[in-house]
Image: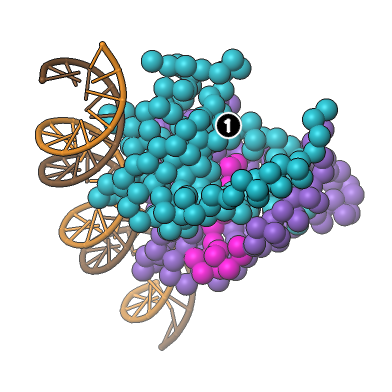
Chain colours: A cyan, B purple, C brown, D orange
Amino acid sequence: MRQTDYNGMAKFIGEYTVKIDDKGRLVFPSAFKNVMSDGEEMKFVIKKDIFADCLEMYTYAEWEKQSEDVKSRLNFFNRKHALFWREYMRDRAVVEPDSKIGRISIPKKLLEAIGVNKEVVFAGSDFKIEIWAREKYSETVISGEEFIALAETLPENR
Amino acid sequence: MRQTDYNGMAKFIGEYTVKIDDKGRLVFPSAFKNVMSDGEEMKFVIKKDIFADCLEMYTYAEWEKQSEDVKSRLNFFNRKHALFWREYMRDRAVVEPDSKIGRISIPKKLLEAIGVNKEVVFAGSDFKIEIWAREKYSETVISGEEFIALAETLPENR
DNA sequence: AATAATTTTCCACTTTATTCCACTATTTTC
DNA sequence: GAAAATAGTGGAATAAAGTGGAAAATTATT
C-alpha cells in the first residue's frame, strides 16, 4: 500500500534499524518505500552531513530541485563558486534499491565516515532521511531543557 | 543498464578511484558509462581546471553547448577576446574510452599538470567529471564551517 | 495460532578492474 | 634509409567487487 503527500513529494517519518549484509548492503525500510508516489523513481542521492556524523538521503527528485537551484546561483568562472560547488558535490552517491528486496549499496567511504559497524538507523526527517550508525544515533539525544532553549532561538512565525 | 536524466544530458555523481596501467591509461568507471544516454557518443573533452590541480572532463555534447555559448559572447576582432579564446582552447584533449574495457589515454602533459602518481580519482560533479591525483583530492577538503562561510558569499536566489 | 510480510543470511553468478603480454606505429639514431 | 628504441594500442587472463536470488529467521497481522 502506498501513501503520498499532497504535493507528490514523499515525507519520511519514523526510525528503522537494519543490519548490514556481508557485502556492505542494507535494505531500505519498506515503510519508506510505501510512502513514495506510485510513479516516483526509487532512486536516491546520499551525502555526508556537514555537521553531524550521519548521511543525508534525498529522493532523486528532491536532489534535482535542490541542485538546480544551487547551480543557477553560481558562476563557474568565479573561484569561490567553483570551490563551493566541489564541496557541494563531494562524497555524494546515487543509490537505487534492488528490485527483489530493496537493498541499497552505499560506498564504503561514506559508511566509514559515519562509523558504521553492523547496524544502521534510517531516521525519517520529512523531506530527507538520515542514516546513522546505531550507537551514535542514541548518543545525539539532547535533554528537554536543551530542546526548549533551542526552540526559543527560532525566528517567530509570520 | 543505462539511465539518463530527463533532458537527455548525463549527470555524474560519485567518486571512483582507478589505477593507472603500465602505459599511462586509465579505465573510465562503468558507473559513469551507465549514466549516459543510449545514443550518446562516448567521447569527452578534457582540460586543466583554471583554479584547482585537477582536470575537467566533459561529454562532447556538454563541451559543444558550453563552447558555443562562450563563442557567442566573443568578438574575434577584439584583442582581449582573441587572447581569452586561445587560453580557453589551450591544453584541451579529446578522449574516447576504447571499446574493450573503456580505457582512456590522457596526454602526459595533462597528467603531469595534476601531479598524478599511481592512482586517480574520477569525481562526478553533475555536468562534468573532475580528475584528480588521489592524494590531492582528499587534501582539498574544507571544514563544515568554511563551507558554510563560502555558501554565505553566494548570491541570493532570484 | 496461522498467515503474511519483511528482514537477514548465505551462496552463486556477473560485471568490472587490474595486470600482463603481444603487436603496431612512430620517432630517433646511426 | 634502415635499424633500434620508444610510445601507443588491443586483447586475454586473473583478481576483485558487485549483483541477484533462494531460503531461513524474524516480525507483524489476521
Q: Residue B87 versus residue A89: which sits nearer the camera?
A: A89
| Residue A70 painted magenta | no
Rendered-image quadrant of the C terminus of chain A: top right
Q: Name the residue under label 1.
A: A127
- The residue located at (55%, 35%) in the rendering is A125
Residue B36 percent location from the top left of the image = 47, 36
Residue A7 seen: yes
**Magenta-drawn segment:** B124-141
Residue B119 picture location, percent across and down? 44, 66
The residue located at (36%, 68%) in the rendering is: B22
Bin the neighbour count of mark 1 within 10 Å (Cα to Cα): few under 14, some 14-19, many 20 and up: some
**Amino acid on which the number 1 mark rests in the picture:** Phe
Q: Position of residue A63 (x, y in %)?
A: 58, 35
Q: Is residue D12 left or right of residue B2?
A: left
As helix, strand or loop, the secondary structure at mark 1 comes to loop
Q: Where is residue B54 drawn, in percent x and y?
A: 60, 61
Drawn side of residue A64 relative to residue A83, left or right: left
Task: State left or right for residue B97 relative to residue A52.
Answer: left
Residue at (40% x, 37% y) in the render:
A16
